[in-house]
Structure formats: C-alpha cells, structure tokens
Amino acid sequence: MTKKEPNSITFKCGKTYLLDDQGFLNPPDQWDEKFAKCMAREQGIWEELTDQHWQIINYLRKKFTKEHVVPVVVLACADNKLRLSDLRFLFPTGYHRGACRIAGINYDFMYESNYWLTYETSTMPRVDHSVTPRGYLSDFDTWNERFAELIIREWKLPQGLTDRHREIITFMREFYTKNKSIPNVFEACKSTNLDIKELIELFPDGYHRGVCRISGLPFF
Amino acid sequence: MGNGENITGQELHEKVVESVTAIKNGPKVLNLYMDVCARCGTCAEVCPVYQGEPTELRNPVVRSDFIRGIYKKYTTTSGKLLGSMVGASDFDGDMKKWVDSFYECTGCRRCATYCPFGIDNSVITRKGRAIADATGYTPDTMKKVVQTSLDTCNTDGASPEAFKASIDFLEEEMKDEHGVDIKIPVDVVGAEYFYVPPSGDVLVNPEATTGIAKVFYVLGMQDKWTMSSKCFDGANYGLFTGNDGHMKADNKPYVEEAKRFGAKYMFMGECGHAYRIMKMMMEKGKWWGDLPFKVINCMEWTADRIKEGKLEFDKSKNPMPVTYHDPCNFGRSCGIVEDPRVILEAACEDFRDMTPNRGENWCCGGGGGLSAMDDIRDFRMKVSSVKKMEQVKATGAKYVATACSNCKRQFMQLIESHNADFAVGGVHDMLSRSILINGKAAERVDWEG
C-alpha cells in the first residue's frame, strides 16, 4: 500500500515524510494533520481519527512543542481522563509506538528526555474479525475497511485498496443486504461495468474467493 | 559515550594500573579470579553474548584478560619477569576498547555457574566499568540515568506530585475494574510493609503495582502497607556503572525512608537488581549497620499467600500460553525461582516452562544495564539475544512474563525488531487480571492476546 524506504515514508496521498531509524517522524517540524491521518492507518487505526484521538494527539503536540516534554503514559491518561484500556483501544500499537508516533514526537527526543518512556510493554494487535477456516468473514456485519485492507495485503497488490475496489465491494454488500443472496459473476460484472481482465487484476483470487470474500459475504 | 576528555594518556595509564594493582589488597575473591583462570573456555560455551556471535573480544576470558594481564604484570613475580609468556600485558591506552567490551557483557553470571573454578566474570566486568567510570569513560546514557537517580531518587526524574497523580489514577483504574475502593497508601508512617517497585511499574506498565494492591486488599491488609512519594524506584544504576559510591548514595534514602515509616519489611517489587542490591549486598554486607526491618520480595510473599490458599483466581482470564523468563538477578543471583511459577500457575490456564530455566536460564541480552542503552541496540537485537529468542519461540508462548523492567524493555524491542507474535509483561500483571475480589475478576477490555 505504501512504499517504505529506509528513512522516509510515502503515503498513499503522495506526500513523503522523513523518518528516523525507528520509524518516528524526524525532523519534527514536518508534522501536519495529514501526517497524523496517514500514520494512523499504519498504526492499526483503520477508520477515521475520532475526536478522542485528536484530543490525545493535540495534548501530546502541546506538551511536545510548547513545554518540550513527553508525559509518561499514566499521566497522559490521567490528564485526559482516560482508562489505560481506552488508550489501547484508541491506539492499538500503544502509547509511545502509536500515539506519540502519530503526534510526530521523534524517538531520540523521547529516549533522551526519559528512556523509560520507550519501555512500555507490548500490546498485541487486536483481533476484531472472526473468520472461518476458509478465510471468509464469519459475520457479515463485522466487515470494515480494515478487513479489506488485510486481504489486499494478503494478495500483495502494489496499489493497495483502490476506489475501484471500494466501488465493487459496495455493490456486493448492498446487493447482499437487499436480496440476502449472492449475485452471480455475470450480474456483478454487468452492474459494475467490470470486464474479466480487470477482475483478475483487481481480485487475483477470482470471483468467489476474491470479490465475495473481500466484501465479507459468507461462503456458500 | 563519555570520552574522558579531561585526562591525558599518561594519567589514564597511571590510574588504570593503580586501580588494577589495588585489587591485590581488595576482596579475596577478586584476587582469586585474577589468579586461577585456566583458560579452558567453558565460559565462552555458555555465554549468551559469545554464543550470539563469536568474536574474539566477546569471549569472557579475553575480556577479563584486559584486567588480568595488567594485574599479572604489576603484582606477580612471574609476570614481572616472564611477561607475556605468563599472560601478563600492559595497558595499551585504548580505553574505548575497554568500554565497548565491558559494555558488551550483560553481567548475567551464567559463566560463574559453569566455570570449574567458579570465576564470576561479571565481577571483573564491574571492575572494568568502575575503572572506566573513574576515568570519565562511562557511556552518557548511564551517566545520565545515575545522575537523575541521585538527584530525584528515581530514574524517571518524576516529582512526588507526578507520582501521587499516577497513584490516584491507578486507584480509579482499579475502581473501574472491580467496583470497590482499592487503596494504594502513600507515605503512611507506621505501615508494616514498605513497597519499593521499579518506577516503570508505577508510571509506564502499572499493572504489577495494581496486582500488589489487590493482593493486600483481598487479605484485608490495606492499612498495613505503604509506598513512598519520594522513594518509589528501586532501580540502582550504580551497580551497572561499577561506582560503589553512587550505588550506596542511591540506596541510602530507601533505608532511611523505611526507618522513618517504622516498617517491618522492605517489600521489594519486580526488579531483579534492586532486590539483589537490597538483599544480597546492603542487608548481608551491613552497609548501614543492623536494620530494624527485613528485606523480602513481593513474589515470594504472594506465592506463600497462594500456597496458604488465601487467594482465588479465575484462570480463564488468562487463556493464552504463558512462559516465564527468569531474570538473571532473581534466578541466578537471589534464588527466587519457584515463587513466580507458583503465581503464574495459579493465575494462568496454560503455563509452560522455558528450557533451560531457573538458575541455568539464558540472559535476555539486556542485562547489566545494557537494556537502557539504545546506541548498542543492534548488538542487543542481533547478538546478545539470539539464543533467548529461539527459546521463547520453542515454547510457543504468547505472553512472556518476567519480573524485571530491563528484561521487559529488551523483550519489547525484540518483539518489534523481530516482528514476533508474543507479548511481554510482569508476573503480578497476570495476577492482577485474574484475581477474584468478592468473587469477581477484573472487568477489563482485553485488547491483547
């Protein structure tokens, strides 16, 4: 989805940022809201950043740029009236690796101001999709864009999840919601104006294992 | 890295020779280590660093010979007469080589366990680091941590107000989990137990501390323990830089605080070297004379309560396979090996032992303070930890419990750089998640494992 080079990152939106060797933004004055939005996706936040996310990010930005400190995780939670589990829910890769990274605080600054900051123990990536042994989503309603992204990663498509994918997935999901049945390949192609060549390009696993699976439709 | 810029080559040479010859009149054991090494190579066979990537300077014998050679040249007759034929050598003026090498030893003391003569290379390493410290060559990170700790009594540099704010936060957190008021008493004079954790267990990964608070609550001993808003970090980096003066200066406020509280027990948290310094050095060596209190460890205490049947658990809260990594300072140096296992077996569904374990465990690769040094991160990730990662993977565990902040930091970075799929945390963390209070385990949103 994004092209990674040793010390820089180019997001899908086309903007490139320089990073330090630990993958944190450096120099820090490159930070802008776009960076936060794009980096959030890299840190397992697949939906849009919510107000709660922004509250933490703005809080960290203020501490970092105005007061030149990074609070330890417990104090950051206390200041923002959050439980530790709330923070983990908001930032699945953790406080320092997730929240601080999105807020554009560089690793060396954190390490030099207090090396314990970088000591936070790990959180495992949360599993929020239950899938069948064949790899189909168990529950149609739990589909979200992250699930689609995971499958795209599995296919190793260089351009990632494109708008064309989204268009086709939306059609499939709307069709299933309305008719409670799965459209056959001709119906799907005709309605979305898809020819067979494009289908194979966009969904290398074919119609059932590709299009249907990525749309979260059940296996039949 | 400190560069000892205030010292000339001549002075450096004199200082090194003087420090090394002083060994002759120092502790008997260090003299013995200087005299008896047979260069059999057993230590290299069992050394996590040498086994990670064998190079000459990583061989414990070669490293110790920096000091041993000078010792032989200046204090033994054979060394004076026969020189290099008996292994004597002079200081070559390259202090940087010394520092690089001595800060590649994790001080895990595995060599001492296997050496036929019982030579403990970590003691020689510490001597080497002490000489580096005296000449101003201690790496900057270490200098800074020691200084912060001497200034503020904790390695975080956190103020008493910040500490109190975090304690309030943890109390609220526990209230949310259990619906009852579980207290963490602060600065209570007259408390029996004075709890001294590493500061990370309060400020960064606080579940270990909430675990302890819950145990006291269940036993109805809420008013019998306390923490100190000044002395809440047992970590003592004087041990790692080899500076005895710093080590004792860092230690003293804790003993005074315990006396001020009139505590019967100094209740050490999950920090290997803090416990080792208190129990094996301060208490046994009578640094501050006879003490009115005993030094105990939270894990042995909790394990005893579990054996007495006073604590109950809902194991299903911890369903994943869990293994225990013995921190060297607990396992090898203090013999705390069964207690953490008692706790984990009680609190988790699937506890698996790592092989080898207990006193024979392999170091995580971040011991001896190395874990705090990010300038040698590559070394820690690719050399000193190679064996440990193999062993953890062989258990299939999804959670590595360990009772040491340095081990946790090292594991955390290992997980990140090797893309490994397990989590790391403390022993009381597991207890905190599954202990029953009024018949109910903590209600927590589980985003892990």
Image (cartoon, coloured by chain):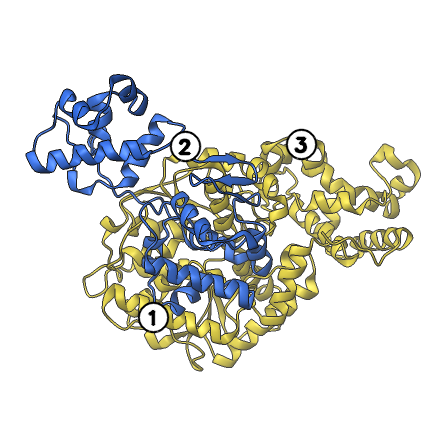
Q: Are marks 1 and 3 in contact (CB under 8 Å)?
A: no
Give above or below for B292 relative to B392: below
**Residue linked to disc 1:** B171
Chain A, colour shown: blue
The x, y position of residue A1, in whole percent, is 40, 34
Q: Amino acid at mark 1?
A: Glu
> Secondary structure beneath disc 2?
helix
**Residue linked to disc 3:** B41
Task: Identify the residue shown where x is 54% and y is 40%.
Answer: A8
Task: Identify the residue shown where x is 64% and y is 67%.
Answer: B248
> Secondary structure beneath disc 3?
loop
The x, y position of residue B243, in whole percent, is 70, 60
Give above or below for A4 relative to A197: below
User: Of the residues under marks 1 and 2, which one precedes in the sequence?
Assistant: 1
Q: Amino acid at mark 3?
A: Gly
- The numbered mark 2 sits on a residue in which chain? B
Please, which residue is most extreme toward the left here? A179
- The numbered mark 3 sits on a residue in which chain? B
**Residue linked to disc 2:** B394
Dot in front, 2 or 3: 2
User: Of the residues under marks 2 and 3, which one precedes in the sequence?
Assistant: 3
> Secondary structure beneath disc 1?
helix
Q: Are marks 2 and 3 in contact (CB under 8 Å)?
A: no
